[in-house]
Image (cartoon, grey):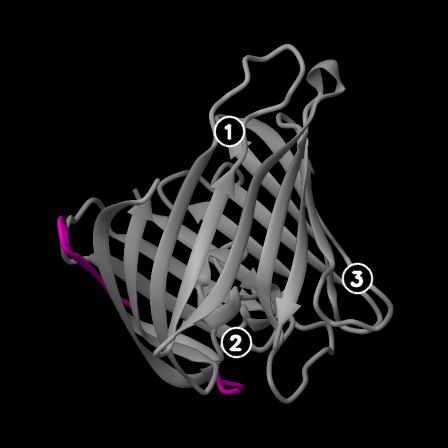
Amino acid sequence: FALKILIIMRTLSVAFIVVSAFVFISSCQKEISWETNGRLNSDSTFLSKIIYLDTTLPVGQDTLNVILYEYDAQDRLIKITEDINDNGVIDTYYTYFRYTGNDTLPLSMKNTGSFYDSSINYYQYSNGLIAYDSLVNYAGINNGVSTEKVISVMPIGSGRFLYKEVRPPHTIPGFPTGSGSVDSTIFSRSVANGNLIDGIDSLWSDGTYVDKKVIHFNFDQKKSPFKKVSFWYSGYYTEASLGIAWGVGNNPVFASETWGGIGQFTTSISYDYNADG
C-alpha cells in the first residue's frame, strides 16, 4: 500500500516517508505541495487543500480523501470539508467554526456529515488555550440530544496539569440510559518556539491507574502549514488538534511515544523543500 498526500498551498513541496520502528506495517510515500492564494503572514501559511492518493491505483481512481479549508476575512478558519472515498462511495463531512466578535479562537465547533448525526463542541479558554470543552450530540432518532462528554483542564502544580473527561449517562430518547464514566490524565509538557518537545502522561480510568506515556519530538526550522488549522488544550495537551495537524510552529522530523506497558513507537520524517522553503 502506498499513500501519497497532496497539500495545496503554492509555497512548498514536501515528500516524506513514515516508518514505525516498533511495528512495521507498510511504507507509505507522501508527497505534499500547496498554495496560499496570496495569503501568507509572518507566522504561518494558510492551508487550503489536502489530497490523499493511493499510488497503487491508476490515475483517476487513486484519490482517497480530499480535505478543503476555508477562512473568513479575518483569516480565521471557518469551515473544513472532507470528502472520504469509502469503496467508491463519497461520504462528505463538514466542520464549522463560530466566533464571537473579533475573537480569533472559536466559541464552538460543529461536525455534521453524510452518515452521522451532528455534534457541537463548546469551548472556554485560559491564556489562549482550551480549558473547558463540552461536546453535545444531536441524534436524528427521536430528536435526541445528549451531552456526550465534558472535558476540563486545570493546573495542579509543579508544571503538571489534570485533563479530566466526564461522560454523563446517555439521555437519547428510545435508547437505554448508559452509565457515566470518568477518564483522566495527569500530564506535563515542554514547549519551545511553538513546538511540543517533550511530554509525560499518567493515564487513569474511573480512578484506576492504567499506564504512563512519554512523548518526544524533534523539528526542523521550516514553518508548519498546519499551524492555522490546529489548537490546544491548556498545558499544550494535543488531543484538540484537527485533521493531520501537528499543532506546532515547525515541521517534525522525529517522534517517539513510549508506553510503560507496551513499548516504544518511533516515526522518522524527511522533507524535500522547494526554493521558497
Residue 171 in which image quadrant: top right
Task: Tell me the tag on residue 98.
Answer: none
Residue 99, which numbered label? 3
In this rendering, would 258 be left or right of 2?
A: left
Q: Is residue 271 magenta?
A: yes
Mark 1 is surrounded, within 10 Å at the Cα level, by few (under 14), some (14 to 19) or many (20 or more) other residues, namely: few
Mark 1–mark 2 distance (CA, rounded to whole Å):
29 Å
The residue nearer to you, when weighing 184 against 105, is 184
Foreground mark, 3 or 2, reads: 3
For image coordinates 44% across by 58% down, the residue present is 163
Q: Residues within 10 Å of mark 3 (few under 14, many from 20)?
A: some
Q: Which mark is residue 12?
A: 2
3 or 2: tag closer to the N-terminus? 2
Identify the secondary structure beneath mark 1: strand
Q: Amino acid at mark 3?
A: Tyr
Q: Earlier in the sequence, mark 1 or mark 2?
A: 2
Looking at this view, is 136 or 217 the one in front? Answer: 136
Q: Give the residue at x 37% y 78%.
A: 159
Asked if the magenta segment contains residue 259, the reply would be yes
Q: Position of residue 214 (x, y in %)?
A: 23, 65
Residue 54 seen in render: yes
Query: On the image, numbered disc 1 is attached to which residue?
Result: 86
Write the start and end of the magenta stretch as one range.
256-277
Q: Position of residue 145 (x, y in %)?
A: 70, 28
* Left or right of residue 59: residue 98: right
The amino acid type found where label 1 is placed reads Asp
SS at mark 2 in the image: strand
